[in-house]
């Protein structure tokens, strides 16, 4: 079962990861608060590991550690896109372990299945409207714009949870979202 824990993300925003320990020897974690709001799991790996080892009462050296990087934790990733890295450590003279390498590896299906909520799926794409359609339907700008649709989708997911319901759409201000490889400035709008 996937658990959620806070870690020191070096910001005023509370940083969180979803994590699971499999077979007693592999810990997989994935950031669920998007950068740049917090320091992501790559730059705060030692902080993430410290939070998990303290919560679980395990020794860092007794586990293999993996960072699953998804759009939930990295605003520049697209929904459904992920990278799965094993963390490689080096120990300093004082015995402290420091991550020195993220070795990309194939992500097991079991992990993909466990973290589907954070990886996302394109089976249920966000609703995208033209500006006049959004106005007619009662949507209003929500003070969030980006040229990156992935960050808008993540914002919608996070803000929707905070408001206990979605009520968000993406408004394509230039009408180019349907053309592959073309960036468009998009904004998130909410009902009422």
Image (cartoon, helix red, strand yellow):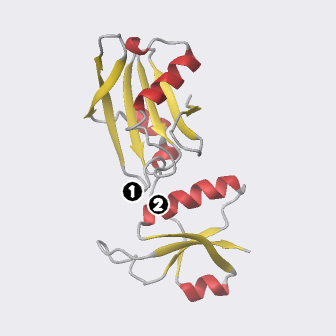
Please, what secondary structure does the residue beneath circle 1 have?
Answer: loop
Q: CA distance from mark 2 to mark 1?
A: 6 Å
Question: Badge 2: few (under 14), some or many (20 or more) residues near its Cα, within 10 Å?
Answer: many
Please, what secondary structure does the residue beneath circle 2 have?
Answer: helix
The answer to whether one can see residue 124 in this image is no
Please give the label number shown on residue 151. 2
Say if 19 sits above or below 97 in the image.
Answer: below
Say if 142 sits above or below 103 in the image.
Answer: below
At a point 68% along the width and 53% down the height, the residue shown is: 162
Say if 141 sits above or below 158 in the image.
Answer: below
Taking depth in this image into account, of 28 and 185 the one nearest to the observer is: 185
Question: Badge 1: few (under 14), some or many (20 or more) residues near its Cα, within 10 Å?
Answer: some
Callout 2 touching callout 1 (CB < 8 Å): yes
The quarter of the picture where residue 45 lies is: top left
Query: Quadrant where the C terminus lies?
Result: bottom right
- State the image coordinates of residue 10 (x, y, percent, origin top left): 50, 39
Q: Which residue was labeled with disc 1? A: 76
At a point 55% along the width and 31% down the height, the residue shown is: 2
């Amino acid at each position: 079962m996937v658990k959620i824990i806070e870690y020191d993300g070096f910001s005023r925003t509370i940083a969180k990861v979803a994590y699971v320990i499999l077979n007693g020897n592999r810990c997989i974690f994935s950031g669920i608060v998007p950068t740049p709001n917090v320091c992501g799991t790559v730059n705060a790996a030692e902080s993430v590991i410290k939070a998990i080892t303290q919560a679980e009462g395990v020794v860092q050296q007794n586990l293999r550690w993996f960072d699953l990087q998804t759009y939930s934790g990295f605003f520049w990733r697209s929904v459904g896109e992920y990278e799965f890295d094993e963390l490689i450590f080096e120990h300093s003279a004082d015995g402290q372990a420091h991550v020195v390498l993220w070795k990309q590896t194939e992500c097991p299906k079991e992990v993909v299945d466990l973290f589907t909520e954070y990886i996302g799926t394109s089976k249920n794409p966000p609703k995208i409207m033209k500006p006049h359609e959004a106005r007619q339907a009662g949507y209003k700008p929500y003070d969030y714009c980006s040229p990156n649709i992935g960050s808008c989708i993540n914002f919608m997911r996070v803000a929707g949870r905070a408001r206990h319901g979605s009520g968000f759409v993406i408004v394509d201000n230039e009408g180019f979202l349907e053309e592959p490889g073309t960036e468009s400035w998009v904004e998130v709008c909410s009902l009422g």
